[in-house]
Image (cartoon, rainbow, N blue to C red):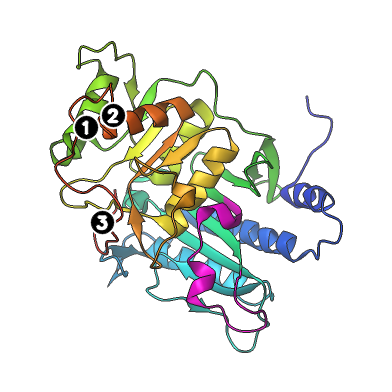
Amino acid sequence: MRSKVVTIDRHIIDEERRFPGASGRFSALLYDIALAAKIISREVNMAGLIDVLGRTGERNVHGEEIQKLDAFAQDVIVKAMDHAGHLCCMVSEECDEIIAIPDRFDIGPYVLLFDPLDGSSNINVNVSIGTIFSVHHRVTPRGRPGQLADCLQEGTRQLAAGYIVYGSSTMLVYTTGIDQGVHGFTLDPSIGEFLLSHPNIRIPDPPARIYSANEAYYARWSRPQQRLVDHFRGLDGDGGGGFKSRYIGSLVSDFHRTLLQGGIFMYPPDRTSPGGKLRILYEAAPLAMVCEAAGGRASDGARDILGIRPTGLHDRTPLYLGSSNFVTLAERYLAGGREGSARGPDFQTSRISERGGSDS
């Protein structure tokens, strides 16, 4: 049994003490994210009893129908984060442009990028959903409103990244660096606190032999991608097989399982979305940082996700993340190596920025 109870506040303070001279602003920013998560969790858990289920009748910048809980989560995060003087701007899946800090509030040194409620197509059927977040240090002069350059940074420059999963319990998982470890906190509703439940999370080695992908799109995939899945199924006659298929259709939930059990999550490009579907800044990059800090890998099929520098706020990418050896195996198939002998997908697989599309 653990000899002490560690709240997320206590954990953040302990981490801050490792950096003499820290101003405390970064720690306060993480507190505010945790507070927003508590409010969203409460509303998600009450969704069937109050009027927050269903659609608003509007669409976001990607052409996706906005759910009422999407709009609620967006509003909660913005209002929890815009007034404390920590941020210079924000970026959200739900907004086309940068979210400015109101003039009446102080301008801070950090940028927050977030997906307020991932998996919104699952809201009405009580399937786990989540919030994804990423924090950068601004690169333009301080004291002024945030600029596009502050937002369009490589994933390697993230100061912190994480997610909250709203399921049978609410968990907040975050990291402050590849070498700083990944820590998970479970919300205890009886006291209203996130308690450290999963310290120093590592992707298991050996990992579970699980692959996760939306196989309804199999016919749209390139032949190398199809051969990769055939290998997992044991249909290629090349000694593969032994993998289980698990797919929820909520990115946070699928990744959370992959983080705790091992395996590989894949959202490959296809003929209708040759540049991929997942957004780099507030979906792929933060989960890639968590994955790599836990000993895994994240790739677009050819290069590390964390090395990609987007040119637009809503740029998209294919995504492969999970156990390092499985992601490397996927890259070999996609490149037409020994395991994937037929080189050449029948469409361009990455380096294409797309707008539009729909949830997984």
Q: Which residue is drawn at 39% across and 66% down?
A: 311
Q: Where 264 sits versus 149, above or below?
A: above
Q: Residues within 10 Å of mark 1 (few under 14, many from 20)?
A: many
Report which quarter residue 35 is drawn in.
bottom right
Q: Where is residue 183 in the image (x, y as percent from the top left)?
A: 65, 40
**Toward which corner of the image does residue 216 lie, by quadrant?**
top left
Residue 211 drawn in magenta: no
Res 130 visible: no
Q: Residue flagged by tag 2: what amino acid is it?
A: Tyr
Is 329 placed left or right of 46 in the picture? left
Question: Which secondary structure lies at badge 3?
Answer: loop
Q: How far across and how far down the image is residue 26, in percent?
A: 71, 62
According to the image, label 1 marks what residue? 224
Residue that badge 2 annotates: 333
Task: Using the image as rendered, state which of residue 114 and residue 292 is in the foreground.
Answer: 292
Region rendered in magenta: 138-161
Query: What residue is at 58 percent from the left and 85 percent from the top?
Result: 102
Nearer the N terminus, badge 2 or badge 3? 2
**Extreme residue in the bottom direction:** 103
